[in-house]
Image (tube, helix red, strand yellow):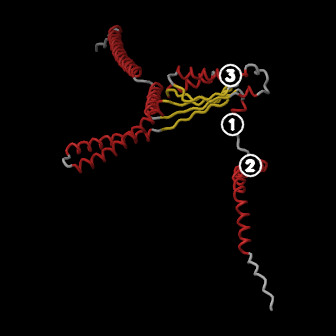
Amino acid sequence: MRATSRPPAHRVVAPLLAGALAMTLLGACGAGDSGAASDAAGGASSEQSSGTARQDLAAPSPATASGTDEKAGTTSVAAAVAARKLARRADVALQVKDVARAASTLRAVAAQAGGLVVSEEVSSDPSAAGAAEDSSTDARTAWGTITISVPTEKLDATLDQVAKVGTVLSRQSSTEDVTGQYVDTAARVQTMKASVERVRTLMAKADKLADVVSLEAELSRRQADLEAMEQQLAALDDQVTLSPVTIRLSTDADALAPQEDPTGFVAGLAAGWGAFTTSVRLVLTLLGALLPFAVAAAVVLVPLALWWRRRRVTVSTPATPPPAAPAA
């Protein structure tokens, strides 16, 4: 028998090494493919993230959107207020050192605002300058009232200018919404105009004298109503366009202080005493007025009454019969 020979060791190890090397190369290729796939996925994710970021930048933030909504709401409210017909007026009480000078300044303020002076009443003592240092004199109680009318949009600025003339003791302003009345009056004016035009059209087509006379009377009546409504609308326009400001001036703050109505027992007693004295004064005044008439009537009627009384006594006394003749 021939002994079996073994292959050499390098023949066995070489295939094993070749297989291991092939497996290593295949693993590296797989890792490279996986890395490329991961890189591709990462790129896609980054592109998606950048697109989302661009969308976020393009879309307004909630704070910006809310700010836009608030601005739009404010604009709509301002437009709604501007569309209303508002009649405004104000009343200011000022303590000043010189009433006449303050009135002159207020006239200048009204002219500067594009308004005018509606009424003015000023009472100032000429000796006020010499008696200004004596607070007990009546010269310091000068007073005045001036009413100016300014455009409504300049009312607030005018009130600020008025406040600089003296010391503001009180300041009141009021606003009246006349939108409903204004719209109703304007609609009535348009209706009356259409009615007048219809009557005029009928007059142009009338061929009988009676119809013409009747239509003329109706036209005159409707024309008068139309003019009255137009005057009311013009008055409402003036109330909305111009705002009156009444300024009360005085050198004494107590003269401009609001007077409260007194109440209580003492106030009632004072009011009753005042009413009693007023009644007595009125009665005495009436008696004094009637006394001259009473004296004149007595001068005429008393002699007449005495004469009439004497005449009645004379007539009522019987005549005395003559004495009888003595008997024979």
For the C terminus, give its image quadrant: bottom right
> What is the total number of numbered labels drawn onto the structure image?
3
Residue type highlighted by circle 3: Asp
Residue 164 in the image: state x and y as whole percent.
63, 21
The answer to whether mark 1 and mark 3 are in CB contact below 8 A is no
Q: Is 175 drawn above or below residue 207 in the view shown?
A: above
Q: Which residue is mark 1?
A: 258
Q: In the image, which disc is placed on residue 98?
A: 3
Residue type highlighted by circle 1: Pro
Q: Nearer the viewer, mark 2 or mark 3?
A: 2
The Cα–Cα distance between marks 2 and 1, rounded to whole angstroms, is: 30 Å
Residue 163 in the image: state x and y as whole percent.
62, 24
At 70% from the left edge and 66% from the top edge, which residue is drawn?
308
Instruction: Estimate how packed mark 2 is, as few (under 14), some (14 to 19) or many (20 or more) residues with alpha carbons within 10 Å.
Output: few
At 52% from the left edge and 25% from the top edge, which residue is drawn?
116
For the N terminus, give its image quadrant: top left
- Mark earlier in primary sequence (1, 3): 3
For residue 36, what is the image quadrant? top left
Q: In the image, which disc is placed on residue 281?
A: 2
At 54% from the left edge and 31% from the top edge, which residue is drawn?
244
Q: Secondary structure at mark 2?
A: helix
Horizontal arrangement in the rendering, residue 218 relative to residue 180 (left or right): left
For residue 172, what is the image quadrant? top right
Horizontal arrangement in the rendering, residue 254 relative to residue 120 (left or right): right
- Mark earlier in primary sequence (2, 3): 3
- Mark earlier in primary sequence (2, 1): 1
For residue 232, what is the image quadrant? top left
Foreground residue among 256 and 65: 256
